[in-house]
Every structure is written in C-alpha cells, then in structure tokens.
Amino acid sequence: MQIIKDLEQGSAEWQALRRCRITGTKLGDVMGSPLERIQLIADLISESGTEQTAMEKPTPEMERGSAEEEFGLKLFAERTGKKIERHGAWISKERDWLMHSPDGVIKGKNGKFSEAVEIKSPKSKTLIFYKLANMIDPEELNLSKSKQNICGISPDYIWQAINYFLVNPDLQTLHFGVYDVRFIEEDAKLYVVELKREDPDVQALIQRAEVALEQFRIDWLKWQDIVLPNNF
C-alpha cells in the first residue's frame, strides 16, 4: 500500500489523486445496481477524457460533518488512549486504481497501520437510530434487508468501511464512529462499532467486493475503449 501523508483532503491535489480511481464513497456504486455501476463508469470515463473531476457543492450537513470529524477523533483518542495519525490517502498496491482517504490511522506494535478510525456526523436522530437498529430485532422493526445494519453499520456506509480493508491488507480493526457534539451527556456523543478482519461476516464482504471490483474494472475498461477510443 502506498501511503500519502502530507496531502490535505479536499485540496486540488487530493481531488486530482482521486481522479479515475475507485474510492471509499464510490465502492457503494460498484456494489450497487446495474444503473449505479454504469453511471459510475460514465463518471470515470468522463474524468479520463477531460482530466477534470466534477466538484459537488457540499451541503450544510456535509460541512458540519467535516468540521466535527476532528473532534470525534479527539474524543475517540481520549477514550481509548490510542495515538491517531492523519493520512491524506492510501492507494492499493494490488489495484492502483483503488484508493481510500482514511479519517484516522493507528500504528500497531509491529509498525504497521493495523487500526483505523472512521467518523460520521449525521443528524442526532440518525445516530440514535443506528444504536437502536443494533439493539432491536430487524423483524420487530419490519426493516427490509436493504435497510438493516450490516455488521453493526448502516448500509449507507458499509462499503466505505470495507474499502479500508481492501486498500490496506495490514488493517485488522476499523473503529467506525458516529459522533454528534450536540448531545449533552459526554458518553452519548460518540457511538463506535468495531469491524475486525477476522470476523467471518467481514471476510465475506471483503470477498464479495473483490469479485465485484475485478468485474467492474473489466466493464469499465471495455466501455472506455468503445466510448473513448485511443487512436494515438
């Protein structure tokens, strides 16, 4: 894995690095419907043809989430005593077209980055719902399978979480935190779910993603050759 430390996430250099690569947020589309996959292929081909990345204006919720990320990491460090480092990006050694932008990373005793931290800052009621969804039987909530938490994580974020393991083969544990500074009680501000590589369910998700990525890469390059042939 290639580690790029001195790179500010959100900067022009960071955006350029993401161009024509599958990222944590894009992996959900790879694992999605045929329409989502072909829309992602169109996006990637357009990036290749224009050498530009489409910039989406962040919503107020996205801006709040980015601002609170640092505070969530700080609270996690205080609770656990773990030393957190910030990296700009990770690029897969096996698939150089696959990358991830980790929120926080933790070096193990062997000197490898064997742990990572992902922080999300949704609406307050969403944080509570995630907790409840892990405590109550999905049948009691009458949740469809597509709405149920996977390994304790919302289906909205599960593939972004799995991408940590795909890019970093040394990663053993991902601490997935949901943070909201607005809660009065300190203990209520951060809810953390741990994903461990050794978990059979996590292993199954990793294997599903690896198979899907290989087929997606084939389809991506096939359509790129058809739609944007290189005549030089």
Image (cartoon, grey):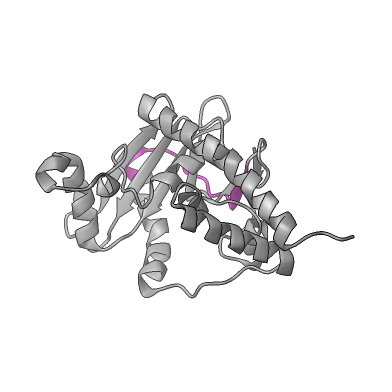
Quadrant assignment for the N terminus:
top right
Which of the pair 150/191 is nearer the observer? 150
Question: Residue 78: x and y, percent?
Answer: 34, 45
* Residue 88 image offset from top left, x and y in percent: 59, 53
Question: Whole-percent x and y of residue 211?
Answer: 54, 35
Magenta includes 90?
yes
Q: Does residue 140 appear in the picture of this structure?
A: yes
Q: Residue at x 31, y 51 (%)?
A: 178
Residue extending furthest front?
A: 226
Q: Is residue 85 magenta?
A: yes
The residue range painted magenta reads 78-91
Q: Which quadrant would the C terminus be assigned to in this image?
A: bottom right
Is residue 205 toward the left or the right of residue 8 in the image? left
Residue 136 seen from this side:
no
Rendered position, 111 above or below 157: above
Q: Viewer-proximal residue, 22 or 72? A: 22
